[in-house]
Image: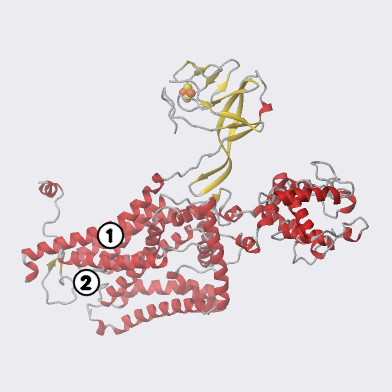
Amino acid sequence: MIRAFLRDRIPLDRNGAMMAGGVSFAHVFGTVLVFLLGIQVVTGIALAAFYSPSATDAWASVAYIQDQASLGWLVRGLHYHGGSALVIVAGIHLLQTAIAGAYKQPREIVWWLGVVLLVLLIAWSITGYWLRWDQAGYWASQVEIGIAAGTPVVGGAIRAVAIGGNEPGNLTLTRAYAMHVVALPVLVTLLTVFHIWLARRHGTTPMRVARNAVPRWPQQTLRDVIAMAIVFAVLLAVVIVTGGADLAAPADPTQAYDARPLWPVRWLFELRVLAGSAEQLVAMAAPAVVGGFLVALPLLDHGMERRPRKRKLWLGALAGLFAMIGALTVASFTRDANDPELAKRQATSEVLATRARKLAVENGVPVTGALDVFKTARFWTARTLFASRCANCHDADSKERKGPVIAPGHGDRAWLLAFLKAPSADQFWGRTKFAKAEAAMKPVELSATDLADLVEMLYAESGAEDLDIKKRDRGLNLFESACTDCHARDEGSPGAAGPSLAGLGSRSYYLSVISNPKSALHMGPANSEMPRFDRELTVVERDALAEYLVWLRTASTQDLIGLGPL
Amino acid sequence: MADNDPDRRKFLKAATCAVGTGVGLMVAVPVIRLVVDPATRTTVTGPTEPLDLGNVDRFRVGAPPRRVEVIAPMVKDGWTSARDVVLGAAWIRRTEPTKIEALSAVCPHLGCAIGWEGKDFLCPCHDSRFSVTGEKQSGPSERGLDPLPVEVRNGRLQLTWVRYKPGSATREQV
Ligand code: FES
């Protein structure tokens, strides 16, 4: 009933389209292309529901799709590799049409539309690649826009329009986005509809003459869907094996990166490398030659002859062109694969990418921009400050070290014990002027057990919880009898001739020392070479350093490495 | 020809539809799963702990209500994280040294910002009036101002930020 209702109201051609030369798997490519386009539209809509085209957010939103949204990696992978599949199948479709002589009169316009569509598909994938705004996409955009900018006379204008102003930024992305999700889809759809309508009007070019026309449905349609299923299976396999599309670290204009354009224009990139000083000329001329030849083909190879062996000249020229493009592409990828230096740089980029994506999942990407995701790493502020303000005097590797070494284990029991035994050893006060002074602390000469007790008492000042209370109490007695001539451990009171040890190794102690080591509470104005930092660093920064120093006490070198590079 | 045998044609049609539907589903399922994903999670995080409004001594006993901004130290929104995000405002009144009351500055009618008019609260959008304790006095609002939980910890005023659905007589958290 519903069928009859619909049939009356949507009067489709009851006989359906006929296939002049019979059905064949050779005729599936056009349908497969429409299918692939459909996948791009559907996956593209889903991705657009997440993507944010701004220089600060773009990478973050792509990373969110890739690493957080359920099946985001799969949909993004289908979209990315599906774009490649479109270009590949379109290329095959074009070659096959040429071999069949299907561009010949009266189907020239169908052919020309196809050539334009292929170019648009490549432009489509290129603009899509920019949108991720990672190192790869950003630098690819630089290369590609750079090629276009080399156009004589109008090059500068092309660049300005493409990137939307003088420097790549928000406007570059909104433009690429408008092209990628509005302009190109609309244009491609319109031209595709026209292309198919014309092709259907002319009918398929019969491959064998002596065959009856056969209705397209269902025999050809079945072949079409089988081909779709095969193409989709391959696509899905590629997506799963590769884990979807990759994503490098956020775009960083200040960081050198080995820029490579997207693969469909990789041959041009290689051609430029080979052309040396003539690169700009070649980059302009090569696409013009290829495009011009494809457009001219129906005019050059005129006449009604369609048998391939009678059209060796033009088919040979076409084959030569495709072979050259293929060879250049392979050469470019091979060159990269055999470059050990490049492999090293890529490994470094890989590490950065992994770190950025991990941090993005854990902490979110700061609204200040994707690159700031690195700053969300644990102790980033403290470690950056340490590297710029403290390392020169306190890092074990520093040639200009002037103070005690600050490294993992700083302030733990072993450290305290070693310090008590030799306060003026090289890794402690050894490099300070104070070490040679009369007032410098002398080694503590006590029995091993007494020393251990004293260490426990000093260690307890840090607020650490893993204490041996009995040892600490014995240590307190020792402190009262052996140390109070110089030191004190009452909150806020300086020692008679040395620093207060109240809260030694705690966060507030470090904050106080960093703020003003010359205070009477600590080393005093005469004995400290360390500058005060309460005027240079904010209290938040000093507190971050203090927190980091507390962490260092229980950290191992491995933990420090685990924080990652800065 | 065998291709024109009606049974065979029927089979071909069924096979075509089956394969076509199968491929279509394989594309549709992940896409739909992705699109509905945000509906299944907390995409914008609110503060999980009470927010610090500063030293209690800022608020004098018996003084008129004082407006303070409620700032979350960190808000994650989808893929971004932002620091010190202003969530809204609250009116704080200290009636006794140990008694502090907080009212949300979000109008319970349709969500405009409430102002203090010297002796009562007024919403400028549709003229809802509320007493100093938050009771509804006149205007279109269906309920009084929304109280917010406050407590004093280590001498600092801590406020728990809650948003209620506007436009209803009862308080329903959003
Ligand atoms: S929003 Fe406040 S009275 Fe309407």
For image coordinates 78% across by 53% down, the residue present is A454
Compute the Cα span from label 1 to label 2.
23 Å
Q: Is residue A9 left or right of residue A114?
A: left
- The answer to whether any part of residue A190 appears in the image is no
Give how far across and how far down residue B92 sits, in percent.
Answer: 60, 25
Q: Position of residue A301 (x, y in %)?
A: 29, 78
Q: Is residue A315 left or right of residue B20?
A: right
Residue extending farthest to the right is A438
Residue at numbered disc 1? A194
Could you tell me which quadrant the C terminus of chain A lies in?
Answer: bottom right
The subunit letter for the residue under badge 2 reads A
Mark 2 surroundings within 10 Å by alpha-carbon count, few (fewer than 14), some (14 through 19), many (20 or more): few
Residue A380 % position (x, y):
64, 54
- In the depicted view, which residue is nearer to us: B130 or A440? A440
* Residue located 67% across and 22% down the image: B60
Residue assigned mark 2? A25
